[in-house]
Amino acid sequence: MSEAELLSRLEDALAALPAPEREAVVTALGYGEGSARVAREQGLSDEQAEALTRSALQLLRGALADCPPDPAEVHPQGAHRRTRHPRAE
């Protein structure tokens, strides 16, 4: 899937979210403001804002579940893999 197709899917998934969840996830994660900002903007407790943001993420994950993962995220360069070595007896 091309980056353009993925971005289009993400935009569609965000547009399909209920407004409070969309605003929460865009503010907290998209703009990097965190759930404290979501709480202030939506008049929620910090716990409610965190729950709303998590709910939005779950909905987005479901909407994008059929998108192939980015290989760099699955196997980041430099990640050490555990290898099996025969035991010396």
Image (cartoon, rainbow, N blue to C red):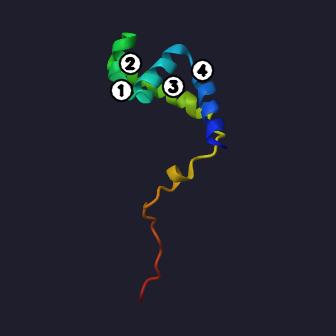
- Amino acid under disc 4: Ala
Give the answer, above or below, for where 83 lies relative to 28.
below
Give the CA separation, mark 1 to mark 3. 14 Å
- Check whether the beta carbons of the residues at disc 3 and disc 4 lie within 8 A of each other: no
> Outermost residue, top direction?
43
Secondary structure under tag 1 reads helix
Say if 11 sits above or below 67 in the image. Answer: above
Number of the label disc, if any, that sits on residue 77: none
- Circle 1: residue type: Gly
Q: Give me the C-alpha separation between circle 1 and circle 4.
A: 20 Å
Q: Which mark is residue 34?
A: 1
- Do the CB atoms of the residues marked 2 and 1 lie less than 8 Å apart? yes
**Left or right of residue 60: residue 34:** left
Q: CA distance from mark 3 to mark 4?
A: 11 Å
Q: Position of residue 48 (x, y in %)?
A: 39, 19
Give me the C-alpha separation between circle 2 and circle 1.
7 Å
Q: Secondary structure at mark 3?
A: helix
Residue underneath mark 4? 15
Q: Residues within 10 Å of mark 3 (few under 14, many from 20)?
A: many
Return the disc, 4 or 2, that comes first in the chain's sequence.
4
Tell me how far mark 2 sits from mark 3, CA to CA: 12 Å
Q: CB under 8 Å between callouts 2 and 3?
A: no
Q: Residue at x 61, y 40 (%)?
A: 3
**Badge 2 is on which residue?**
38
Residue 56 tag number: 3
Q: Earlier in the sequence, mark 1 or mark 4?
A: 4
Tag 2: Cα neighbours inside 10 Å, few (<14), some, or many (≥20)? many
Q: Earlier in the sequence, mark 3 or mark 4?
A: 4
* Quarter of the figure that contains the C terminus: bottom left
Q: Residue at position x 43%, y 29% from top?
A: 29
Please say if 61 is above or below 42: below
